[in-house]
Image: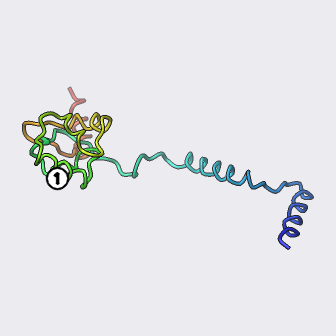
């Protein structure tokens, strides 16, 4: 019975001048539709939430887990891993951070501007309004 209905639909489509799509074309059409939808929507990266702008550095040997979470690519779990690791092995250099599972050379390179192994922890989020005001102040002679 299904063959007869399928045949009738194909015949009707041919008579009307439209061809029924083959099974191979259906995924291709879906992919094209998805691509068109992506182009129509604004591009967002990752989760869609913007990371705050940071200023200062984190002393890896003194910062608590909450402060470490401000770093890019560091969430609650990784912050705890850093704290636990440094209890056994204090950081002698920033490059020691790659010994923590999940932190490779590329991630370290992105985090490096905010890392230190001595001195005070001065890392803080810069408010977008303050940053814009600071840029305006810098522009005035």
Name which quarter of the figure residue 7 lies in. bottom right
Q: Residue furthest top?
A: 141
Q: Residue furthest left?
A: 119
Residue that appears at 49% across and 47% down: 42
Residue that appears at 11% across and 47% down: 88
Q: Give the camera-side residue of 132 and 17.
A: 17
Q: Is residue 136 left or right of residue 89?
A: right
Check disc 1 and report the residue beneath it: 65
Element type at mark 1:
helix
**Label 1: how many Cα within 10 Å (few below 14, some 14–19, many 20+):** some
- Give the x, y percent position of residue 90: 10, 41
- Give the x, y percent position of residue 137: 21, 34
Numbered marks: total: 1
Name the colour scheme.
Answer: rainbow
Q: Give the camera-side residue of 101 and 75.
A: 101
Q: Residue furthest bottom?
A: 1
Please tell me whether residue 58 is drawn above or below residue 78 in the rendered image: above
Residue that appears at 25% across and 29% down: 139
Instruction: Give the quadrant of the N terminus.
Output: bottom right
- Give the x, y percent position of residue 76: 24, 55
Please tell me whether residue 134 is drawn above or below residue 10 in the rendered image: above
Instruction: Give the quadrant of the C terminus.
Output: top left
Q: Give the camera-side residue of 96 and 115.
A: 96
- Give the x, y percent position of residue 130: 22, 43
Residue that appears at 28% across and 33% down: 109
Q: Residue furthest right?
A: 15
Q: Is residue 50 left or right of residue 42?
A: left
Q: Give the camera-side residue of 34 and 39.
A: 34
């Amino acid at each position: 019975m299904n063959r007869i209905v399928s045949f009738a639909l194909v015949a009707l489509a041919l008579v009307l001048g439209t061809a029924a799509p083959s099974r191979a074309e259906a995924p291709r059409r879906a992919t094209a539709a998805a691509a068109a939808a992506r182009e129509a929507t604004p591009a967002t990266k990752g989760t869609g939430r913007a990371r705050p702008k940071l200023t200062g550095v984190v002393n890896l040997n003194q910062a608590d887990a909450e402060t470490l979470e401000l770093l890019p690519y560091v969430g609650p779990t990784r912050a705890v891993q850093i704290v636990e690791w440094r209890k056994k092995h204090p950081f002698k250099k920033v490059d020691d951070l790659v010994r923590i599972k999940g932190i490779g050379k590329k991630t370290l390179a992105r985090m490096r501007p905010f890392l230190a192994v001595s001195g005070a922890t001065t890392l803080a989020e810069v408010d977008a309004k303050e940053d814009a005001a600071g840029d305006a102040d810098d522009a005035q002679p």
